[in-house]
Amino acid sequence: MTALHEVGDQLFAYVQRDGGWGWSNAGLVMGDGSSLLVDTLFDLKTTQAMLDTMAPLISIAGIEAIVNTHANGDHCYGNELVPGVDIIASEASADEMDELPPQALAALVDLDVDPLTRAYLQSAFGPFEFRNITMTPPTTTFSGRHEVDVAGRKVELIEVGPAHTRGDTLAYVPDADAIFTGDILFIHGTPIIWDGPVQNWVDACDLITGLGVTTVVPGHGPVCGLDGVEMVRGYLVWLYAEAKQRFEVGMSAQDAARDIELGSYADWGESERIAINVDSIYRELDPSHESAGVLANFTLMAELANR
Ligand SMILES: [Zn+2]
């Protein structure tokens, strides 16, 4: 169920459904008279519903800035609905946003492909409306670390990408021992490695753990603690080793994705993302690795999801 949760003093997490494809989380950090929105959502309808839910809070502390944790559309396509505010993102994320316009996703959903792939794309992206979105890019970019003063309240932005995407950023709220991780964490869902290297992602998990936070808001799925960070770290380390073994004996990335036994990870949502994850790990192991391509990976995910 989609809901706004109070996760700390003047601190809120907006958690959507089960956290599956496109159902991302966002956050609101309230300062004294104004607030910071951490991420917008995948389309205008879902973002407007979130802003309506937050209305009683925003009426006290209007949104003065947005942070986009990374470039995936489910974390930035709704930016236009908060006009005139500062939009902050890492420089790497801002660059990547230019390459992922909403129209490209609209086209992906409508591709003339085999019925199984088409049904998979429809189930992942069909619930969202991409055609009416005006991409609204960041107005402030940074590299490394960047401190935001939210009406007297400190929020620390920590760039940890490339990992899930090129410019992944954490939003750490020290006074609440809380962190918004963007898609560095998927809880009860399978992480998706668009970029890597995996070690950067593992390091990001260790950084979060090192902060000793008690409240962790993932990019997808329910709010958790450091146990959630360990679960994701465990998946990454396990999958890297499994993929590497198969790479070393010359198995193709697609066959490796079919071959790896998921064990308990089969219970996580979208476990078929292993198709993209293994492909990314192969690229990491051999920069000249020729990916089957995004569409072929969606076809493989459709196959894995239906077996
Ligand atoms: Zn996401």
Image (cartoon, rainbow, N blue to C red):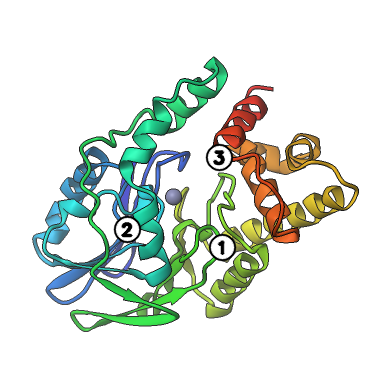
For disc 1, the marked residue is 163
Tell which circle, 1 or 3, labels the residue nearer the N-terminal end: 1
Q: Is residue 249 visible?
A: yes
Q: Nearer the viewer, mark 1 or mark 3?
A: 3
For disc 3, the marked residue is 294
Q: Pointer 3 and pointer 2: residues touching (CB < 8 Å)?
A: no
Residue 39 is tagged as: 2
Label 3 to label 2: alpha-carbon separation = 25 Å
Q: How many marks?
A: 3
Tell which circle, 1 or 2, labels the residue nearer the N-terminal end: 2
Counting from the top left corner in percent of width and height, residue 184 is at 52, 60
Which quadrant would the C terminus be assigned to in this image?
top right
In-image side of 134 versus 169 (left or right): left
Residue in front for this viewpoint, 282 or 174: 282
Residue 233 is tagged as: none
Q: Residues within 10 Å of mark 1 (few under 14, many from 20)?
A: many
Assign a secondary structure to mark 1.
loop
What is the three-letter code of the residue carrying label 3? Answer: Val
